[in-house]
Image: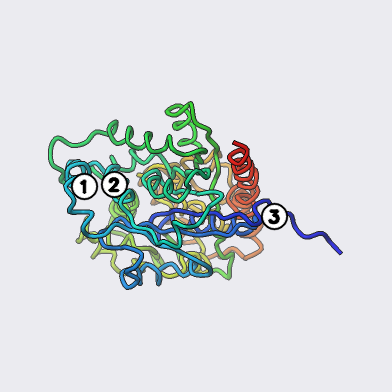
Amino acid sequence: MSAPPFLPLAGRNVAIVHPAWHSCGTYRVVLGQVAAYRALGARVAPVAICDLPGFTPDRAWRWRSFVEATPELSQDERWFGGAPFHAFAAPRFLRDVLWPYLHGDQAVIRAGVAERAELALGLTDRCFDLVHCNHFFLMPAAKRLARGAPILLDSHDLQARQFALMNEHMPWLPPRVTYDEMLARELELMRGADLLLHLNAQEYDDFRAALPEKQHALLYPSAPEAPLGPGGEDILLVASNNSANVDSVCWFLREVLAGAQIPHLRIVGNVDAGVKARDPALFAAHRAAFVGRIDDPGAAYATARLVLLPTISGHGLSIKTVEALASGLPLIATSHAFRGMRMDAARFSDVIVADGAADFARALKAAAADPRVPSEAQRAASDMRRFYDAHFSLDAYRANLAALAPPLIGATMRA
C-alpha cells in the first residue's frame, strides 16, 4: 500500500483576502490560490471585500450577482466584507479619504474602504494560521483577520502605475495626486506584511529596490488550464474591462484592422462595455465581433485556431497571456503582452511578435487565410504549453507555495 501524500498545511486555517471582482485576471489568480492551498491540505476561507458602499456581509441580496458570477468559490465556505453606508458619510472618511480621492488618489479610497469593511462575527472569531492578502489596499482587512498570524501579500503589480494609467482618462479636481504620493501609500501598507509575493519579474525587481528591508519572493501565479481542443474557426481576443485593455482593443480595431473585417473574429470578455464608452462609433463598426462576458472564458479557447494579444498598455503580468500560452494555440502578440516574464517569446515556434500596427495586420491577414486548425496533440506538445506547465500550472504554483508558506507559519509560532 502506498503512503498517503504529504500535505504540509494539513489542519491549517488559511484566509485568502481578495477584492470582490470577477471576470478579470485577479479573480483567475485567486482561484489558483484557493486550489493550491486546498491541495496542500489547508482549510481555506476566501474573503471577498467590496469597495462599494452598503455591501456588508449581512446583506446577502446585495452580493447575489457577485455570487452568481463566481460559482467556483461556492464549492466550500466563503465570506464577504464591505463598508456600511454610514461609514461613507463619517467626517473622517470625507476628510481623509473622499477628499483626496476627488483629486485622483486611487490608493487612499481603496484602502480607506477596506479599513471600514464589516466582517462577519463567525469570521473574525476564527484563528487563522496564515492570511494571504491580494493587493496592498486590502491589508487593513487582512490585519484584522491575522491577529498576529503571518501575512503573505500578493502585490499584483506596482499598483501606483496602474492608478496613474487610470487617471489619464478621469476629470479629477486640481491639484491632481501624484504618482509618488500614491506609491508612498502603497509602500506603507505593504510594510505590514511578513512576506511580499510578486507575480512578475519586473515588480519583483522594483519592490525589492523600494522595500529592501522586507522579504520578497517571485511567485508566478497559477492560471487555469485552457482546453486543448477540439479547435475550430475562431480567431480569439480575450480582454476584461480595464483601462489598459480598452486602450489595446481600441488600438487593434482602429490601427490594425483599420476598417477591415476579419471573418470569425471573436472579442470575448466585458471589454465591450469599455470600448463602447470610450469610442461608440468604433464599437458600432465592429459590433459583430464582440461576444461580451461569458461564464467560462477558458471554453473560448476550445473552438479557436488563433489567439491575438494586441497589448499596447498596462503593467504587471498579463493573465490572459498566460491563458493563451496554456491553450497551446498559435499567437500573434506584441512584445508588451509578455511583460514580467523572464522569457524570449520570439523563440517559440508558434508565436509571431508584431509591435507595429502594420506588422500585426500583415501577420493577422496571413494567419486568417490559413485554414489549418492545430490538433489537441499538437497543442499539448507545443513549446508554449510546456512553458505554461513549467511556470504557471497549478502543480508549479503548489510546489513553489509549499516552499514558502509552511516555514513562515513555523517561524511565527517559534517567535
Instruction: Say few, some or many: other residues with alpha carbon within 10 Å of mark 3 (under 14 / 14 to 19 / 20 or more).
Output: some
Q: Residue at x 42, y 28 (%)?
A: 210
Instruction: Say few, some or many: other residues with alpha carbon within 10 Å of mark 2 (under 14 / 14 to 19 / 20 or more).
Output: many
- Residue identified by numbered label 1: 93
Q: Quadrant of the C terminus?
A: top right
- Residues under labels 2 and 3: Cα distance? 37 Å
Q: Residue at x 46, y 48 (%)?
A: 133
Q: Which residue is drawn at 26% across and 62% down?
A: 54
Disc 2 to disc 1: CB gap under 8 Å: yes
- Amino acid type of the residue that numbered disc 1 sits on in the rendered structure: Phe
Secondary structure of residue under mark 1: helix
- Residue identified by numbered label 3: 7
Label disc, if present, on residue 10 of the rendered structure: none
- Amino acid type of the residue that numbered disc 2 sits on in the rendered structure: Gly
Foreground residue among 223 and 239: 223
- Residue identified by numbered label 2: 112
Q: Which residue is drawn at 28% across and 46% down?
A: 112
Colour scheme of the picture: rainbow
Secondary structure of residue under mark 3: loop
Is residue 280 rendered to the left or right of residue 110? left
Q: Is label 1 or label 3 in front? A: 1
Name the spot of residue 169 as percent of width and height, x first.
21, 46
Between discs 2 and 3, the one toward the N terminus: 3
Name the spot of residue 97 as percent of width and height, x first.
22, 44
- Amino acid type of the residue that numbered disc 3 sits on in the rendered structure: Leu
Is residue 173 rendered to the left or right of residue 136? left
Secondary structure of residue under mark 2: helix
Between discs 1 and 3, the one toward the N terminus: 3
Between discs 2 and 1, the one toward the N terminus: 1
